[in-house]
Image (cartoon, grey):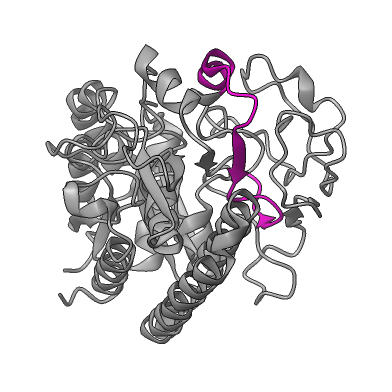
Amino acid sequence: MSIQSASVDSMMKLTLKGLGAGAIALGLFSCAATTSSGTGDAGAAGDSEKLQVVTTFLPMTQFTQAVAGSCAEVSQILPNNIGPHDYQAKPTDAQRISQADVLVQNGLELEGFLEPMIANAGNPDLQIVEASEGLELLAMAEGGHDDHGEEAGHDDHGHADEKVAKADHDDHDHHDDHDDHGDEKVAEAGHDHDDHGHEDHDDHDDEKIAGAGHNDHHGHDHGEFDPHVWLDPQRAAEQVNVIRDGLIAAAPDCQAEFTANAAAYTEKLTALDQEIEQDLAPFSGKTFVTYHDFANYFATRYGLGVDFLVGVPEENPSPNDVKRVLETAQNSGLKTLLTESEASAATFQAVAKDLGVGVSAFQPNEVGGPESLEPDYYFTVMRENTANLVAAFTGQN
């Protein structure tokens, strides 16, 4: 379907009228929503002979399950139908952590609910695995600039001044005093270090954080770095290996099994990456549009641009946000806008109607049904996202 020729300004006026109801509903949802129950209310794992591992949300569970095999019992803290943006901790969560040997988290300030839970658990022997430790990271991006953190050496899509940050953690022993980041060195790229509304982050005073010269009004729900690392299969493989090392440190006798399981899973991730790269190669340099800011790692990996309407799911779009997205969609010739939840889909409909395009899904793999806890669910979601993205560019399902 071709994009209508109406001017951006006239379309924006019509669009803003349609955004109100969807935006009100949007605050009730996170990156996605389902009605399935998860593991968050389950008790602590029952086999005391196995390594007891708790994870935070889906990708951490999928990756940890893939590595754990028969040597560890894995239990997710969050219900699988609630994402980390929305989760409100319960007293039973601290109890579960108190009984665990290992906690696996994504990190990068995505799981903001964890700190008080860990403190309340009173488990000095808990080993914490931060799966994003040591990875090359992208700074939180600001919509409308198409500068979403290009990697060094990546094809230049107008991101020459963007610097990629790498958390320089040489030790993957996942030490207990995980809150001490004084030795972490990350490249500075001219960011003005706005406060972004974070609380209790004084322990990061010595951390050099990279930005990208943004005002970063879209990044206030996260830290300086984009936390959605797992949406790049190459970085997902790195996360799997970080988890492998953390489990080996906790249970050295299982090193052979953890190593073999991680190798098998990362081999599948490599194959997936090659498959996606082939599917998206014809669209290199094109920009797609999502509702909120979560697809930067995916876009960067495959040489795409990505724009978004709001920085975090709960935000309401401004007139400038709507105008920017309308212009991006027009310039890219998009046939579909991509969103991740029913609430944001309803809000996006007003924009899509003015453009004469459809609305489809691009899931960040943060929530799902019972099957989403299995390691292979990651591959299902990523293949569906790729197919929907190809359709967004071509109009062919």
Q: Range of the magenta residues?
A: 115-140
Res 326 seen here: no
Quarter of image, res 234 = bottom right
Residue in the foreground of this view, choosing between 66 and 309: 66
Quarter of image, res 54 = top left
Residue 138 part of the magenta-drawn span = yes
- Residue displayed at 58% across by 23% down: 123
Res 149 seen here: yes
Percent position of residue 223, x then y: 62, 33
242 relative to 50 in the view: left or right: right
> Does residue 139 lie above or below 127 as drawn?
below
Quadrant holding the C terminus: bottom left
Residue 195 part of the magenta-drawn span = no
> Does residue 111 lie above or below 98 as drawn?
below
Quadrant holding the N terminus: bottom left
> Does residue 341 lie above or below 116 as drawn?
below
253 relative to 336 in the view: left or right: right
Quarter of image, res 309 = top left
Percent position of residue 318, x then y: 41, 29
- Residue displayed at 83% across by 35% down: 207
Count of marks placed on residues = 0
- Residue displayed at 23% across by 23% down: 20
Percent position of residue 216, x then y: 63, 34
Percent position of residue 235, x then y: 56, 64
- Residue displayed at 33% across by 62% down: 375
